[in-house]
Amino acid sequence: MPTMQELEIKTGRRIEDIQAGLLSLERDNYITWVDKSDTQHIVIIEGWERGRSRPMSPGDANRYFTEY
């Protein structure tokens, strides 16, 4: 898992916005984040959109970002 600083650099977002997004993912039960002192403590529960019967393949991801 990237650090907060790495996420800030890669996404161009402020740390506060990244934390808000992660808290939203936690509320929606996509991740658990018990020790919020570091992103290394994040555990991914669901790694794809709900309603999909399988994880996205690389081709699916490319289509998602180019066609929608």
Image (cartoon, rainbow, N blue to C red):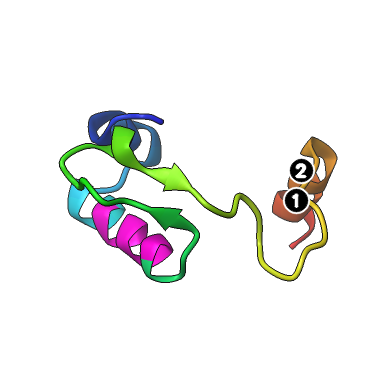
- Does the magenta-highlighted stretch encompass residue 21? yes
Count of marks overlaid on the render:
2
In which quarter of the view is residue 20 placed? bottom left
Mark 1 to mark 2: distance in Å?
6 Å
Q: Residues within 10 Å of mark 2 (few under 14, many from 20)?
A: few
Q: Is residue 66 above or below residue 9?
A: below
Q: Which residues are magenta?
A: 19-26
Residue that appears at 76% across and 43% down: 62
Image mark for residue 62:
2
| Quarter of the view holding residue 41 | top left
Q: Quadrant of residue 59?
A: top right
> Which mark is on residue 38?
none
At horizontal 21% and vertical 46% (from top left) the residue drawn is 35
Nearest the eye: 35 or 64: 35
Question: Is residue 63 located in the magenta-colored stretch of the structure?
Answer: no
SS at circle 1: helix
Q: Residue 7 in the image: x percent, y percent?
A: 34, 36
Q: Tell me what residue is drawn at x 78 percent, y 63 percent.
A: 52
